[in-house]
Structure formats: structure tokens, C-alpha cells
Amino acid sequence: MDPDQTLVTQAAAGSREAFDDLVRRYRRRVYNLVRALTGGDSEAEDLVQDTFVRAYRAIGGFRGDSAFRSWLYRIAVNVVHTHVARRRVRDAAFVATIRDSELVDEVPDGDDMEEAFLRRQAIDLALATLPEELRVLIVLRDVNGLKYEEIVKIVKTPRGTVESRLFRARQRLRPMLETLISVKPSLERVAKSVTEPCEASPHGEDS
């Protein structure tokens, strides 16, 4: 059962308080998702607000065919997609980065600060080389840890296609990270953790 079902039912019936509880529960996660997909766009906060405004307007029609989280993330992805399309008109040089959700929630100290910075730098540079359709999947699966069933519903793409695109995305990250290693050997552990899934076949991963 969807852990959000009670609040969703109340919100769909018109309870603003229930919807506000859902906002508090998911605001940070939606913010991390939006920042990852837009490369830390200065308008990320506005996009998060737009996501919840659209969700509030549409929740009355939420049928529960998927988990509320999947439904909400789908709205966020659509909001970002529209924003990126508009931004591409203004600026042909589309650049995107990825932020590890753990680094957003936790601030390392001491020697861990340098490793955290290097990790984020490596991921930022590598993910910027991926096209949007691959970057979205990496963010949903490898950053947010969503299961394939949820990702399929969010991106409206068959599971086989999702798996093969993820495999291609991870394969494309490997040479970029290896290049970074040649410049900064201290990134070796980071690169290994990011590219390790490449060893699996595109259809042999866990759900």
C-alpha cells in the first residue's frame, strides 16, 4: 500500500492541510531531483513551486494507478522538460550537472570535505556529457534510487528501453571518469563507485 495514500485521499477530497503535509514530506526530494536535472539552475526553487502547484491542481484526478511519489516525480520531470526547452531557445549551450542527494542532506567535515567535493565534481563533469533522456534515467535510478517499475511510469518508456538506456549512459560515463582520473588520481575510488554498474548486462540488473 502506498504510504501516502491517506494524505493523498484527503488532499484529493479538498484538504489543504493534507496536501501541505505531502509538500513537507517531498519538498526536499523534489528539489534535489530538479537541481540534478537542471544543473543547479538558479530557477530550481521556482520549478519546485511550479511542480507542487500543478500537483495541487491535478490531485483531484489522481487515480492511484501508480504510487504518489511516481506521479509527483512525473510532474517534476515534465516541468523541468518544459523549462529546459525554453532555456535552450535562450541559450544553445545546455549544461547539466548531478548532485548526490546524500551530499545535499549532509555536510562532511575534515578530510571528507575534499573527497565529497571531488565526487561531486566528477559526477558533474561526467553527467554534463549525457543527453537529457539518459541523464534523467541516471538521476532517477542512481541518485534517487527508484525502482525500474517507478521509472517506467515516470518517463513513460518500456522497461527494456529504460534498462538499455541506463546501460548506455553508464558506459558513456566510464571514459569521462577515466580521463578525470588521469588528471586527478584521487578520483579513482569515486569513478569506480559510479561506473561499477557497467559490469552488469543491460537486462540483468535488480529491480
Image (cartoon, rainbow, N blue to C red):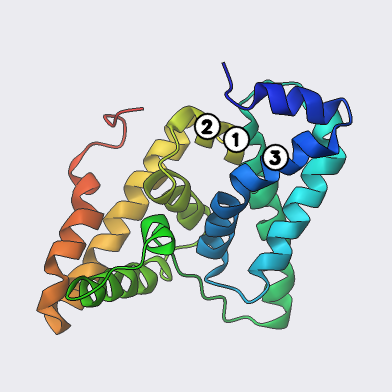
| Residue labelled with disc 1 | 70
| Res 15 quadrant in image | top right
Q: Is mark 2 on a helix, strand or loop?
A: helix
Disc 1 crowd, CA 10 A, few/some/many (<14, 14-19, 20+): some
In three-dimensional space, the C-alpha distance between marks 2 and 3, rounded to whole angstroms, equals 22 Å
In three-dimensional space, the C-alpha distance between marks 3 and 1, rounded to whole angstroms, equals 17 Å
Q: What element carries label 3?
A: helix
| Residue labelled with disc 2 | 150
Q: Is residue 207 left or right of residue 119?
A: right
Three-letter amino acid code at the position of disc 1: Ser
Placement of 33 over or under 178, stated as above or below: above
Which is more toward the observer, 99 or 185? 99
Q: Is residue 68 left or right of residue 197?
A: right
Label 1 with label 2: CB-CB less than 8 Å = yes
The percent position of residue 114, horizontal first and vertical second, equals 22, 77
| Count of numbered tags | 3
Placement of 53 over or under 94, stated as above or below: above
Placement of 192 over or under 114, stated as above or below: above
Which is more toward the observer, 46 or 24? 24
Q: Which of marks 1 and 2 is nearer the N terminus?
A: 1
Label 3 with label 1: CB-CB less than 8 Å = no
Checking the image for residue 21, the label placed there is: 3
Q: Which of marks 3 and 1 is nearer the N terminus?
A: 3
Q: Which of marks 2 and 3 is nearer the N terminus?
A: 3
Tag in front: 3 or 1: 3
The quadrant of the picture occupied by the N terminus is top right
Checking the image for residue 145, the label placed there is: none
Disc 3 crowd, CA 10 A, few/some/many (<14, 14-19, 20+): some
Q: Which residue lies furthest to the top in this view?
A: 1
